[in-house]
Image (cartoon, helix red, strand yellow):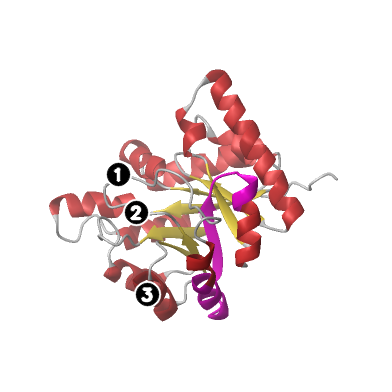
Amino acid sequence: MTVKLVPLRLGVNIDHVATVRNARGGKLPDPLRAAAIAQAAGADGITAHLREDRRHIVDADIDGLMRELKIPLNFEMAATPEMVGIALKHRPHAACIVPEKREERTTEGGLDAAGQHNHLKPMVARLSDAGIRVSLFIEADERQLEAAVTLGAPVVELHTGRYCELEGAAQQAELARLQKGAALCGKLGLECHMGHGLSYADVAPIAAIPEVRELNIGHFLVGEAIFVGLEGAIREMRRIMDQARGVSA
């Protein structure tokens, strides 16, 4: 069965605007201003990860985003009672459950949805019952994808970090794994998103995967904004995504 290509959604992660702010303290640069620029530049949604240690996004940022955003907020969160409570308080459009370790610099891999089934099941149910669209940040692995179905999550975000770090034949093998995982999402009835580590240099092959509906990109865009501005960085990412997709935005 041929999958019809539709324009990809772009979720812009603003975490690292907050990282720069927190490096010195104070209020600047303001992540809410970054979200407004992303919105004006054509982002389809904003992603923000409220970590347990509040190393970048903080609670006040989530308050402001929920108050001011005109596009959906994807609230990234660890699978903890505290974060479930915060999500239920704000009721963002989506909540993406991610693995989280205090010592990591960034998310290092996918959530073990299969191994944590009993822990995750009631959390997914509570979020879903509140009208929040739940996604799971997982590896492109059959066991994990099937677990997402049994957990009742309608969306998965496949981890692209390893693909972005590799080169040559090894990168092509990882791309093939992601393509296979995306195809399985289609068969299982899961909406497939992808993200982590994507840049201009490697986004096109991911954007061309027909089953993928959304990409979430942050660190690269915030870094590129130093040189070209955030609006310019987002518009160029959108251009590359659309060109790879072969469809008009």
* Residue 176 falls left or right of residue 219: right
* Residue 22 falls left or right of residue 200: left
37 within the magenta span: no
- The residue beneath circle 1 is 105
Q: Where is residue 240 in the image (x, y as percent from the top left)?
A: 57, 37
Q: What element carries label 1?
A: loop
As displayed, is residue 245 above or below residue 10? Answer: above
Residue at point 38%, 68% (across, down): 80
As displayed, is residue 86 above or below residue 110? Answer: below
Distance from disc 2 to disc 1, alpha carbons, whole Å, reads 12 Å
Disc 3 crowd, CA 10 A, few/some/many (<14, 14-19, 20+): some
Magenta stretch? 122-144
Residue at point 59%, 51% (across, down): 144
The answer to which of 234 and 99 lies nearer the viewer is 99
- Residue 246 in sight here: yes
- The residue beneath circle 3 is 86
Q: Please tell me whether mark 2 or mark 3 is closer to you in this view.
A: 3
The answer to which of 88 and 241 lies nearer the viewer is 88
- The residue beneath circle 2 is 15
* Residue 133 falls left or right of residue 27: right
Q: Is mark 2 on a helix, strand or loop?
A: helix
Q: Where is residue 173 in the image (x, y as percent from the top left)?
A: 61, 27
Which numbered disc, 2 or 1, marks the residue that appears first in the sequence?
2
Which numbered disc, 2 or 3, marks the residue that appears first in the sequence?
2
Q: Furthest residue to the top?
A: 168
Disc 1 crowd, CA 10 A, few/some/many (<14, 14-19, 20+): few
